Image: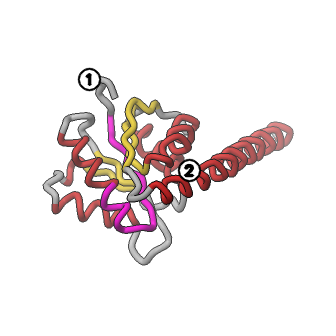
Amino acid sequence: MSRGTKADAIVVLGCRSLSRLRRRLELAIEVFREGAAPALLLSGGGSGAEPEAEIMRRTALTHGVPAAALLVETVSRDTLGNARYSAALLLARDWRRIVLVTDRTHLPRAALLFRLAGLEVVGRFGVRYPSRCTAICSALYEAAATVWSLARVVVGAVGTLIGQRRNSRLE
């Protein structure tokens, strides 16, 4: 992110690993304190008993982030959902420019999906993995996940077009 670039919000993506979640949030709080954006959007419903975004919200508050600066998205279950539901929250406020925070190898796929959801990614910050082996495995996973995510986007777009054609015929 270049100096002087200001975003509307910093979006932090959730994950199943609490240690990785904590590292992502700590990096996002650091970026927030440096003035990159006036708000943190904590995104992630996850599959646990408590949504990942709620865990991040509680932690951010204990680190001194004002409650007024926090937005919470607890519906998403994956990166595509993070992008869709976060975009809905942000665009409703007419916010389009975001800084994205997640793991390093996850950034390219996440940024692509957030762009496709209608947001402008003006900055990216990625948490490093603890080992080279973990980073390589994650990069391989992300390559496959990118193809799968894009297939889901295309199928969703085709379904929308078909639904629109059906509705126009009925009118």
Which quarter of the rendering shows the N terminus? top left
Q: Is 97 displayed left or right of 136 in the figure? A: left
Quickly name the residue at label 1: 3
Q: Could you say where residue 38 lies in the image, as x and y percent from the top left? A: 24, 38
Mark 2 element type: helix
Dividing the picture into quarters, in which one does residue 157 lie? top right
Q: How many marks?
A: 2
Residue in front for this viewpoint, 12 or 168: 12
Amino acid type assigned to the residue bearing label 2 in the image: Ala
Quickly name the residue at label 2: 139
Q: Residue at x 60, y 55 (%)?
A: 141
* Residue 70 vertical position relative to residue 19 in the rendered view, above or below: above
Q: Is 112 displayed left or right of 72 in the figure? A: right
Residue in front for this viewpoint, 129 or 148: 129
Q: Residue at x 42, y 46 (%)?
A: 89
Amino acid type assigned to the residue bearing label 1 in the image: Arg
Give the extent of the magenta segment: 8-23
Disc sitting over residue 163 in the figure: none
Instruction: Bin the neighbour count of mark 1 within 10 Å (Cα to Cα): few under 14, some 14-19, many 20 and up.
Output: few
